[in-house]
Amino acid sequence: MKLRSGAGGPARRARRIWRPLALAAVIAGTGMSFVHPVFGDSDDLEAHADPLETLDCAPLEPIQAVHSDYTPPAGIDVRGAPSTPEDALEAWMAQRYPAVTPDDFAVVSEASDHVRFALSDSLGRTVAVALVGPHADGWGVHDLITCDVLFRALLLDSAGEADIGEAGR
Amino acid sequence: MKIRTIVPALVAALLLPQAVPAGAHSWGDWYIRWTDRNVNCPGVNCLDTDRDVHWGFVTPSGTNGFPTGDSRRSRIRDAAARWNAVGTGMTFHSDLPDWSALGYPAPCPQSSSDLPDEYQRNKVGWGSFGDSTYIPGLEPAGEVRSCWWDFLDGKGPMMILFRMKINKDVNWYIGTGTPPIGTTDLWGLAAHEFGHASGRTRGGDGAGHFKDSYSVCPGDPEDGQSPSGRHTMCQTLGPGGGIGARSLEEHDRDTFVNAYS
């Protein structure tokens, strides 16, 4: 009796089972279109730790975030932009919270594409985190995230109600 | 490869746990979502459980008042409509009367008793960030402030309020055509800002942006031509005055969908 070596053979059956599984593993491993692609370098997440974990806000304290977006138009000279992260932070704070100076902030992380600053109150609690990054020909504050109550208490210590913005909402 | 091999492989791939590469992002990496809580507080519909986010302009005579009489307001509404068109459970509604002031910066509501009615929270204003001389790169073209509460119920923090301020000293293009050299596209900038107002506030560069170095942000911002495919939520609006930011691209939409669908 001649054994069939065709589709019913054990080796062929094994290939039939394992080949799709191997291909499936490759598809799953590369992610294909089922997950978001990798946008940038591998240290993105480490470089930008979640500010919620950095801040020492009180329980149930609201958090305020300010996003500033810089959009230099084509053909326009932007040489007035701050040339260092510290200059950018100083200019930004001067417009919004003049009672706070960059000297009050400490650098907590630094890379070629960002510097993150933290501001602490007299008890050592981190009450604000500023993200400064490059854009066009300079640097700018992209993000300031604050523990709203603790940060305003710090501002009141330094300035006074009149200096912390429009009271109305 | 034979079809009888490919088909079961694809089926198996869908069933296997997906190996997520480093850098892949879920909604939580990008978004503080608008609240879906129903909190007992004095205002009617104090917190919005259906994630309909109502907003209004500041009256022209008010502090940071938004002008009327031209197409600027239309471009702002057009920008919000781009996000609504994605079709998630979160939508912007420009259905409020003008407000007297932007309230900017102002404290976040501290508790539910301090929380304005949902129809009094979210505002769009028009004002300066310094003197009337705009220095690109020194002053922002636009800013969004947002307030979050953490309800300590394990669901993470939730957006409760946004305030948007457009820099009135920028040389804006307020039409729907091609921005001339030296102008910035208001529609494009506003589309970007509404991305932040939707709750996109972290991840990427740390502020909710795709880095300009990412593949989804092609093009030199100082060029005159806007490349196709540049995403709205890149760090800068990009070439051509930012015209490309008007339309949401694949990953702008996907991260938004992940947050609210």
Image (cartoon, coloured by chain):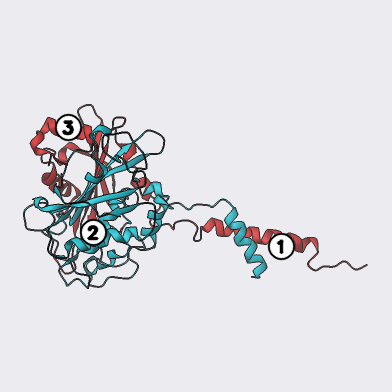
Pointers 2 and 1 within a single chain: no
**How far is mark 3 from mark 1, CA to CA?**
69 Å
Q: CB under 8 Å between callouts 3 and 1? A: no
Closer mark to the observer between disc 3 and disc 2: 2
Q: Indicate which disc, 3 or 1, sits on the residue closer to the N terminus.
A: 1
**Which residue is identified by label 3?**
A154
Q: Residues within 10 Å of mark 1 (few under 14, many from 20)?
A: some
Q: Determine the image quadrant of residue B34.
A: top left
Q: Position of residue A34 (x, y in %)?
A: 50, 58
**Which residue is identified by label 1?**
A16
Position of B229 compared to A7: left or right? left
**Which residue is identified by label 2?**
B190
Protein chain holding label 2: B
**How far is mark 2 from mark 1, CA to CA?**
55 Å
Pointers 3 and 1 within a single chain: yes
Residue at horizontal 76%, vertical 64%? A12
Residue at horizontal 22%, vertical 32%? A150
Kind of residue indicated by mark 2: Ala
Closer mark to the observer between disc 2 and disc 1: 2
From the image, state the color of chain B: cyan
Q: Position of residue B140 (x, y in %)?
A: 17, 54
Position of A114 compared to B49: left or right? left
Q: Position of residue B145 (x, y in %)?
A: 22, 46
Viewer-proximal residue, B123 or A123?
Answer: B123
Secondary structure beneath label 1: helix
Pointers 3 and 2 within a single chain: no
**Furthest residue in direction right, as rendered:** A1
Kind of residue indicated by mark 1: Arg
